[in-house]
Image (cartoon, helix red, strand yellow):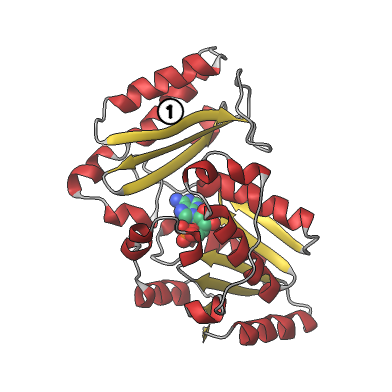
Amino acid sequence: MRIVNQLDEAYQLFRAERIDRKKCGLVPTMGALHEGHLRLVERARAECDFLAVSIFVNAMQFNDKGDHERYPRTVQADLDLLAAKGVDMVILPTDQEMHPEPIQFQVVPSGLSEVLEGASRPGHFAGVATVVMKLFHVLSEGLAYFGEKDFQQLAIIKRMVVEFHLPISVIGVAIVREADGLAMSSRNMLLSKEERAAAPALHDSIEVLRRGYASGERRVESLVQQAKTELAKEPLFKVDYLCVVNPATLDLLEFAEDNSRILVAANIGLVRLIDNSVVGAIDAQK
Ligand code: AMP
């Protein structure tokens, strides 16, 4: 496994593989890898000839400095996990390599990026889109894998590829959960014991909404009320949003239908957790 700190070197390695007609893949991450990340890596490994994973804790996408400082960093353990998965290249740039100072350009998305996470975390998606655009230039052509865990991010990246005519297929991978339903996240390791015990309530509230839909309720107001009541049983959580949206446009819906998306964000202590799920198809989700 090659570990590459220079983006130009990574670009050249992808290029050489493409000249050899190899299908190139990229899994962008911020490290502190867990099973969720590894599911993306496994899927990509099965579909690509040459697979790179990037690890970069992108300061540009943290609107909260403390959140950036607290973000877990476990590079050596990450490298061991990626080597065991047969990854060909790890792209591990420094801050200065990724974003040379003085920073004068950003990819600033609008529309999809202004709601939900975008509304609560100003500048977040500009930071994400900018770093992903840089990584996409390094990849140039191929497949890129993102988790549905960050559902809004996935929608924005898919749209970015369309609008900038990038020859990159963006592939979404289903959420990987702990046995108690909590969506895996690098931030979970920041939870205290008490917070960790309370955290599955987020997923439970989604399941309440899904069950409400399965039993015939379609009015979002009523479904969301049921879910919020469930989440309120766990006083450690402070809800930011809990809503049902059109999965492509992220527009808020008045009436839920199959494939509508439930999106939730809530704070527990200092940690912000997000989760989501499709409405309907309960059996397929289990
Ligand atoms: P991050 O390191 O948090 O930026 O995540 C890197 C990629 O892994 C993103 O595309 C995430 O959506 C994805 N990811 C993170 N957690 C999960 C999970 N529990 N299930 C599936 N994908 C995930």
Above or below 235: residue 59: below
Residue name at image x 54 percent, y 71 percent: 53
Expressed as whole percent of the image width and height from the top left, the position of residue 91 reads 54, 78
Q: Quadrant of residue 62?
A: bottom left
Q: How many marks?
A: 1
Where does label 1 land, which residue? 207
Q: Is residue 162 visible?
A: yes
What amino acid does circle 1 point to? Glu
- Name of the residue lying farthest toward the left: 194
Above or below 261: residue 5: below
Q: Nearer the viewer, residue 174 or 106?
A: 106
Position of 88 with respect to 197 (left or right) is: right
Expressed as whole percent of the image width and height from the top left, the position of residue 182 reads 36, 43
Expressed as whole percent of the image width and height from the top left, the position of residue 126 reads 59, 57
Expressed as whole percent of the image width and height from the top left, the position of residue 247 reads 64, 36
Residue name at image x 41 percent, y 64 percent: 33
Q: Is residue 89 visible?
A: no
- What kind of element bears circle 1? helix
Position of 84 with respect to 201 (left or right) is: right
Residue name at image x 52 percent, y 75 percent: 86
